[in-house]
Image (cartoon, helix red, strand yellow):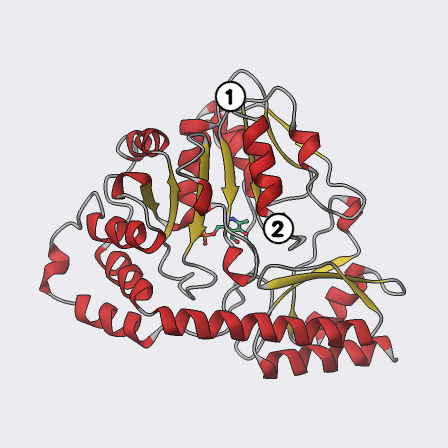
Amino acid sequence: MSQYWSDIVHHLTPYVPGEQPKLQNLVKLNTNENPYGPSPKVIAALQAEAADSLRLYPDPDSSRLKAAIADYHGLNSNQVFVGNGSDEVLAHVFQALLKHDQPLLFPDITYSFYPVYCGLYGITFETVALNEQFEIAVDDYLRPNGGIIFPNPNAPTGIPLALSEIERLLKANTQSVVVIDEAYVDFGTESAVSLVNQYPNLLVTHTYSKSRSLAGLRVGYAVGDAGLIEALIRVKDSFNSYPIDRFAEAGAVAALQDEAYFQQTRQQVIAARDQLVLGLQSLGFEVLPSGANFIFARHQNYSGEQLATSLREQAVIVRHFKKPARIAEFLRITIGHEAQHQALMQALRSVIQA
Ligand SMILES: Cc1ncc(COP(=O)(O)O)c(C=O)c1O
């Protein structure tokens, strides 16, 4: 604390990201990174970019990347916004599109950055409880609001919402922006990108951090009506003209050009998830249905805290949320590769059979 702080800083409760441990040899299943490295074509593009041209600023409009994303989704470039990770894209979305007199709505159990942005930008919000099965119930959002945002699949539950339900929400809610945060969509959830040309109030965000294995490059984007995108560009150009550096643009474009690698690795993650679910169920875990690259699981005989602590003692780290109480017994486990799953299962067996 310091007398020099702006007033708002005293009242901020910042987001706490999952731990990035300095220790080697940990089985790291806590931040939903991809167990596979990026496409070799991305590495080659990054190497080519390490050149004299780095003395020059990058393209402030990231035109090449926007065109590649637009082409990938069958949209126009003016329907695409790119940023330094989807967290930055979301920050601009909150400020540009979700700050209104009526409260913003999002689930009570969801990505914990949403209330943090509300604190930063002074946005009033109300949380909407997930149903008994930990699902998003669209009917509960059909009330006056200044905007609606949720991830699909939701985090940290991993549960997907059917596209027909999202369309039902869009049909009923036409007066405010609906943001679908599709950070994990490529792991088996239906995307709402196919609806953006029909609904001018729909914005869909994606990240390169998960299915494209590029969490370290920091690239995210939003697609939607050109009017919504224009609002994001105005905020971005009032904040930082160059959020996408030369490496990020080159790497992100190259990633989109290697569809075969993308398909192969995402299918491997999905297959590994299905195997891990079976393994955990055989140890007595209840696992929520997942359309993501992580699973959310609890055990009736062992507390979430006890399991997370024992795993850590055995050099396996997973994410455990102490709050809210409804999810305190769950562990969120990122899908890893075969050897990591074996280490996880072995560590769990030693606790559960002890
Ligand atoms: C639901 C959700 N949205 C957005 C993000 C942000 O991803 P990034 O900033 O790496 O693009 C995350 C990261 O974990 C997430 O879980």
Query: Could you say which quadrant of the image residue 90 lies in?
Result: top left
Q: Quadrant of the C terminus?
A: bottom right
Q: Is there any visible trace of residue 197 in the rendered image?
A: yes
Between residue 310 and residue 342, name the one nearer to us: 342
Residue 240 spot, x, y in % from top left: 27, 38
**C-alpha span from label 2 to label 1:** 26 Å
> Which residue type does callout 1 highlight?
Gln
Q: Kindly identify the residue that appears in the image at 21 percent across and 43 percent down.
A: 61
Q: Kindly identify the residue that appears in the image at 66 percent across and 53 percent down.
A: 159
Question: Which of the labelled discs sits on residue 175, or is there none?
Answer: 1
Mark 1 Cβ and ligand 1 under 8 Å apart:
no
Q: Secondary structure at mark 2?
A: loop
Query: Could you say which quadrant of the image residue 114 lies in?
Result: top right
Query: Could you say which quadrant of the image residue 4 lies in?
Result: top left
Between residue 50 and residue 189, name the one nearer to us: 189
Between residue 178 and residue 122, name the one nearer to us: 178
**Residue that numbered label 2 is attached to:** 155
Residue 83 spot, x, y in % from top left: 34, 46
Residue 23 spot, x, y in % from top left: 54, 73
Residue 279 spot, x, y in % from top left: 74, 77
Q: Secondary structure at mark 1?
A: loop
Mark 2 Cβ and ligand 1 under 8 Å apart:
yes
Between residue 75 and residue 324, name the one nearer to us: 75
> Which residue type does callout 2 highlight?
Ala
User: In the image, is 247 to the left or to the right of 270?
Assistant: left
Say which label, 2 or 1, has the lower sequence index.
Answer: 2
Mark 1 burial class by Cα count in 10 Å: few <14, some 14-19, many 20+: few
Comparing labels 2 and 1, the label whose residue is closer to the camera:
1
